[in-house]
Each structure stands twice: as C-alpha cells, then as structure tokens.
Image: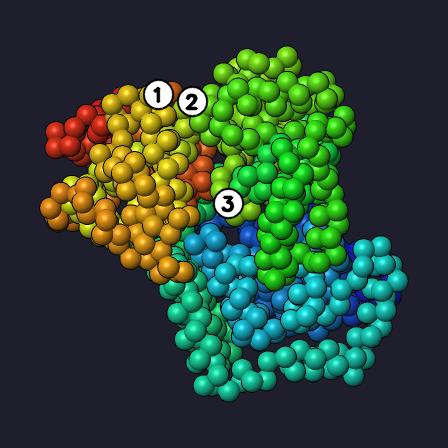
Amino acid sequence: MKNFTLNLIENKTAELIFDMQKEKVNKLSTQALSELDTFLDEIIESDLETIIIKSAKQGIFIAGADIKEIESMSDELSVKNMLNHGNEIFNKLSTLKQTTIALIEGACMGGGLELALSCDFRVAIDGSKTKLALPEVKLGVMPGLGGTQRLPKLVGLQNALGMILAGSVIDTRKADRIGLVDKVIPKGYEEFQIPEFLQSISTPSGKQKIVEKRKSKNFLEQIPFVRDYMYKKAHESLIQKTKGFYPAPLRALETIKKTWDLSIYDGLKIETEEFSKLALSEVSKNMINLFFISEATKSKKFDAVAKEIQSTAVIGGGVMGKGIIWLFSNAGKSVRVKLRKIEQMGDIIKSVKSIYTFLIKRKKTTSHDVDFKISSITYTDKYDGLQNVDLALEAVLEDEAVKNEVYANLEKNMKKDAIIATNTSSISINQLNNSLTCKENFVGLHFFNPVDRMPLVEIIPSKHTSQETLATVYKFMLSSGKTPVIVDDCAGFLVNRILIPYVNEALFIAGEGVNIETIDKALSNFGMPMGPIELVDTVGIDVGYKVLQILQNAYGQRMTPAPLIEPVYTKLQLLGKKSGSGFYMYKGKEKTINTQVNTYIQNQTLLSEDEIVKRCIYMMINEAARCLEEEIVKSSEELDLAMIMGTGFPPFRGGLLKYADSIGTKKIYEELENLQNSYGSRFEPAPLIKKLAVSNKKFY
C-alpha cells in the first residue's frame, strides 16, 4: 500500500488519507483505485462507524483520473474495463454500512468529485484553492465514474447540467448553495467544526435533515415536461456554442436524459458506453494532447530563479493599456499608471470597472474584492512613485522615438533591477532594446485584445534579456492567469505573422469575386471563431492595412497585401466595426454586406468551401512551418498552443500543425505546389514542409 493510509482518530472513526507517492497531485490511477478497493474491503470487515476521506496534498483533494491512462487506451473494451473497475469500487464506497464523508480541501476535479459524490456527505474547507468541477468535456469526453448519474440527483438537473455540459468550476460558496457540499468550514476551524458536523449527523434525524434540504432544491424537476423543456433549451444552447464540433457535451446531455429514471447501476452502463466511444475519438485525443501541452507550459524550466513581482506600473491608457491595468490589478498587484493627462484616468477606471462588473455578474469575483483591487490603482502625469516598482509595462504609440523617451524616464526613476516591458506589436524588441542602459531587464510582452478575454501573451526576449528577467515575467504571467509562449524577435512575432497571411488570402479570394459571406461561412464551418473578413473589420481595416505593410517590408513578395484592402481603406476610408462600416455594415448585433466594396471587386465568381478553406488554412500552415524552421518558437506544441490561445484556432482539431499532420505533409506539399501554379509564389512551399514530405515525416 503506497497511496492510502487508514488512521484511527477516535473511537470507531477513521481517516482514509490519499497521498499519491512521487506525484504533486492525487490522481485516480488504476493502481490507486485498486488500493482504495483493498482498503474498502478492510473497512467493510471492521467495526468502524465513520470514515473521513481526505488528502495529504496541499491545495489538492483529487485532481481526477489519470489522463495518461485514458490517452493510452486504443479499444473500447479496455476503456469499459477500466470504467467498470472504477464504478465497482465507487459503488462499494456508496453502499458501505459506515457513514462516509469526503473532506474536500483544494482542487476536487473529475473522478475526484465523482468519488466525493459516492460518499454520504461532503464537507469543504473554504479557501481560494478549493474548487469543484466535472471538467471532462474539456478533454473531449464526459464524466465516466458516475458523474452523470449522481450529480443530477444530488443538486438537481439545472445545476448539474451547468457543471457537466460546460465543465465549469465552482467555489465553495456555490457548492454550498446548490447542495453539492453539506458544510463549508473556514480554514483553521477544522478542529472544532468537523467534530460538530460529525455530531450533527450521528443521529438518523440529523442525517435526514440534510437529505431533506437537498430534495427541496429540485422538486419541480420531477415533472417530466419541465425536464423535457430543460433538455431542449440545453441542446439549443450547446449547438449555438459548439456548432456541433464537440460531441462530448451533447452525448453527456443525452446520457442524463436517457438515464434520469433508471437505477444507478443501469445508468452507469449507459454512461460507460458513451464515455468509451468518446475516449477513442480524434477530438478527445486532440484535446487531451492540448491539455498536456498546456500543463507543460506551467512547469517550464529556466536557468535562473524568478523574482516576485509585487508592484507594477503601466505607461499608457489606450485600449491595450486599460486591459493591462485591469490584468495587473486583478493579479493582486499595485498598479501605478503614468498618463499624459490626469483627465484620462476617469475613463480608464470606468473601463477597468466595467470588466470587474462583468465578472461580478458571472459570480467570478465579489464587490468587496473589486473595491480592494481598484484601490490598488494610483496614477500620475509625471514619473513619480516608481521607485519601488518591480515591473513597468509601456503601452504607448507605435513610435520608436516616443517609446525610447519613455524608457529613458523609467530608467531614471525606477530601481536598477526593475524590469521594463513593451507591448509593441510591430517594432523589433532588439531595436527598442538599444536605447536602454540595463538591457538585460528589457523584454517584450505582447498581449492580445481584449486582454481580459484573450489568454495568450507572447514573451519576446531580446538578445540581451537575462534568464532571470525571462523567468520572472513568465511566472508572473502564469500567476495572472495568462498562457505565456516564448517567441523569438521577428516582424509580427509568432501569432500575427501566421494569422495575417490567412486573412490576406481571404481578401485575395474576396477580390476575385467570391462573396465575402461565403468566405466567412466556410472558415466558420471549419471551426474558426469568426470568418477572416469579419475579423479584419473587428481588428480595424486601418490596423490590418498597416500590419500588412510592415510584414511585406519584412518578408517580401509572399506577404504582398491583397489588392482589395488598399482602396477599401484609402478611397472608401472604411475602418470596420469601430466606425460602423467596413466590409460589412454594422447595426447593433446585425451585419450586412457593404455594397460599396463591390466597386473594387471583380465579377462574382464561385469557389467551393473546401477550396476557400484550403487556400486560407494552408497559407497559415506554410508560414507556421517557416516560423518553426527559423526557431521563432521552439516546438510544434508551443506553436499550436499559441495559435489556439491567440487566434481561436479550433481546439478540436488539435492545433494548426496537428491538423496538418492529420492531412499529411506530403499531401500538403503537393497541394501548395498546385496552389503556387494557380495563384503565384506566395504559396511556394516552405523548405521544412518539403523536407518533411520527402522523408514522409510529421510536425509532431
């Protein structure tokens, strides 16, 4: 026995403690489940009356099943055997004659929550790390150890659907409110309140009181037509959100619907069948692979120890500056804002508060927490109050002279080892670095708009940036909730360098006379969050025009702007959504084609959806291969993570290069050659693609 210990704490009450050896977190591996089974057999034969299941790990109850074991499964029978084994153990736990209590402190995820649901009672220790969820749909599967069976019956259908279909994470307050936990104990009060809880459930009447409280929450859901209406609305919402690309939440919903009136044992059979099919799907394999890539970013190693960032400064209060001010304050850091005019601060605070208001409505934070974070923001129109700042981020105009002036003032007024970062999207980091004295403390932090919603941040070191600076900003971005990817310095950095050719190709297609709605629909049907033409309008036609010129100067003919964008911007003077008119006309949430653009479009022509997708997506793959070959990013995995987090490339496809591998590098090479013959040198295959095609190798 390596992972569990059973300790008698008082007369006929014992703690079953989970502490997975040689692991940072507790996972329900096959071995761990077998050990649990053995302990349950021992408990059955004992005279114990109460079992408290708890974790010895700090900040973790149980992180869930061992995902590597799921990933390794290659046939349905293996998956079913694994699930049946787990369900037998959880059923044994749920039918023990002893009273069982899951004492939850820290993350309680997936199989960990399903184990807790198999106990008679659940007690949560309050704290920021105690979170509960059934996040399986985010891995392309669904709960497989009773989650679809036990959770709806405990917390009611509506509450269960919210957790299962979206994989949403809830805190102790919500868990208590919906009846998922029976008691929340403040941290530090366990010694007193756990015995009180044990005393309260020691009698039949005490137990019944809690059971009755649970039932009172969902009595309307016992009415069939009420449930049918809820299933219908949930299905409509899923189709709207997922466009049918993600089968797991739809299968989970159907499973809950089918099994509502069945016994737990019959329901588990259906749940097992559905899980087994999903676990072997390409979508699940892709999303599990992305999970491992994402986890790897959290444990990246550096040749230096990261410093702690406590105090920050932001220079600039534009759109990006406002988002970064919110981000730093939300991370619990003090933020000193340097503005040209003090009058700007009212608008900045209003914007920051609007983000927090949205989070309050979504119950992601509280008014009390927001008031505290807002109070950490101070401002100045000079460079005072910066002497103790650990990191200052510049987000001013894309003008090298203006930026250099900012850096000179920062170095005069900040401590010598303070980090200076830039949010530039178009100027070389190495070029900007030249004006600084402490070059080792300078780094690029390229955020994406809107900052509060886009998870990616590109970290761009200069050739002088120290490992300590790199490690520090990387750790700070992780703790701020961002997904950092380190990229080398080049025009467009990584994401924009790959994305812009995709958008530009869509504009080429539009200029040839293909209906812009047809283009956008084709790429939306592929899985992109919005069509490329609408994306141009959203970012701003002026911004797109400027970036295209920068990339053409850097990369030459293959980045030549599509002929359509120049007259749309310079002659029609269209800006996109921000002005109400671009390639589309915007009125509220409605959009219609702007017929003004037709002046600069050839006669209407037809192009198949497959051809549109191929031209746009293969253009991205080709540029991504160049970035990989030039080591702008170190691995295919990091590149795919950046494209998903920075552009919304469909996760179910596994990432841009993972998708390329599914087609085959040889076929992509041949298709690029055909496109080059038809449309010109911008489709010339990247040397890496040719190399992989010849050797019949993949990106991964």
Q: Amino acid at mark 2?
A: Cys
Label 1: how many Cα within 10 Å (few below 14, some 14–19, many 20+): few
Question: Which residue position is annotated with label 1?
Answer: 554
Label 3: how many Cα within 10 Å (few below 14, some 14–19, many 20+): few
Residue 135: x %, y % from top left: 53, 56
SS category of the residue bearing label 2: loop
Question: Which tag is nearer the camera, tag 1 or tag 2?
Answer: 1
Quarter of the view holding residue 99: bottom right
> Closer to the camera, 534 or 575?
575
Label located before the other in sequence (1 or 2):
2
Question: Which residue position is annotated with label 2?
Answer: 490
What is the CA distance from the residue labelled 3 to the residue labelled 2?
23 Å
Q: Is residue 352 left or right of residue 580?
A: right
The relative height of residue 517 versus residue 636 in the rendered view (above or below) is below
Question: Which tag is nearer the camera, tag 3 or tag 2?
Answer: 3
Residue 113: x %, y % from top left: 61, 60
Q: Amino acid at mark 3?
A: Pro
Marks 3 and 1 in Cβ contact (< 8 Å): no
Q: Is residue 390 left or right of residue 527?
A: right
Q: Is residue 345 left or right of residue 400?
A: right
